Image (spheres, grey):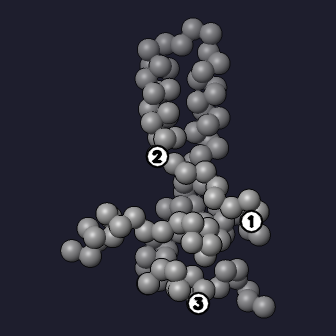
Amino acid sequence: MSLMYPSVDELLNKVDSRYKLIALASKRAKELEELPRLKDELLKLKREEKPTDRDKKQIQEIAAQLETLVGPTLDNYKSVKPIGRALEEINAGNVQIDPVNKDKSED
């Protein structure tokens, strides 16, 4: 049994370099951490009885951020930490490098 699940070898079958793997996993882990925080913040702002113009602007900004984030893609995770969950999603093939950004990074 491997000390880490999924193993680096398994992950490198999905992503062609360690650098890209680290970048993809860290970005996805950050998204997984941000999602609940943003949802809580949005609910808190929406509960205000008399929202100020600043509150309304924050609500719009948070809603826009939430539209760009994808929630968890697996039903069950072995890991409890966001980075482990991100690696599991990569291994399952649910998270990939955006082809548009990939082309830019290769220039």
Q: Position of residue 106 (x, y in %)?
A: 26, 76
Label 2 SS: helix
Residue at image location 76% in from the left, 63% down from the top: 76
Q: Earlier in the sequence, mark 3 or mark 1?
A: 3
Q: Nearer the viewer, residue 92 or 83?
A: 92
Residue 32 location, quadrant? bottom right
Please give the residue where the numbered disc 1 appears in the rendered image.
Answer: 77
Q: Examine the image and state in which quarter residue 46 appears.
A: top right
In the rendered image, residue 43, in percent from the top left (x then y), is placed at: 64, 28
Please tell me which residue lies in front, 17 or 81.
Answer: 17
In the rendered structure, the answer to whether residue 35 lies left or right of residue 54 reads: right
Q: Contact (CB < 8 A) between labels 3 and 1? A: no
At mark 3, the secondary structure is helix
Task: Decide which of tag 2 and tag 1 comes sooner along the chain.
Answer: 2
72 vs 63, left or right, is right
Q: Please give the count of numbered marks on the rendered protein.
A: 3
Q: Earlier in the sequence, mark 2 or mark 3?
A: 3
Per the image, the residue denoted by label 3 is: 9
Extreme top residue here?
50
- Residue at 60 percent of width and 86 percent of height: 10
Question: Would you place residue 85 above or below residue 2 in this image?
Answer: above
Q: CA distance from mark 2 to mark 3?
A: 30 Å
- Callout 3, which amino acid? Asp
Residues 71 and 59: in front is 71
Name the residue at the left extreme: 107
Q: CA distance from mark 2 to mark 1?
A: 22 Å
Kind of residue indicated by mark 1: Tyr
Secondary structure under tag 1 reads loop
Give the residue number, with chain letter if any, for mark 2: 68
Amino acid, disc 2: Thr
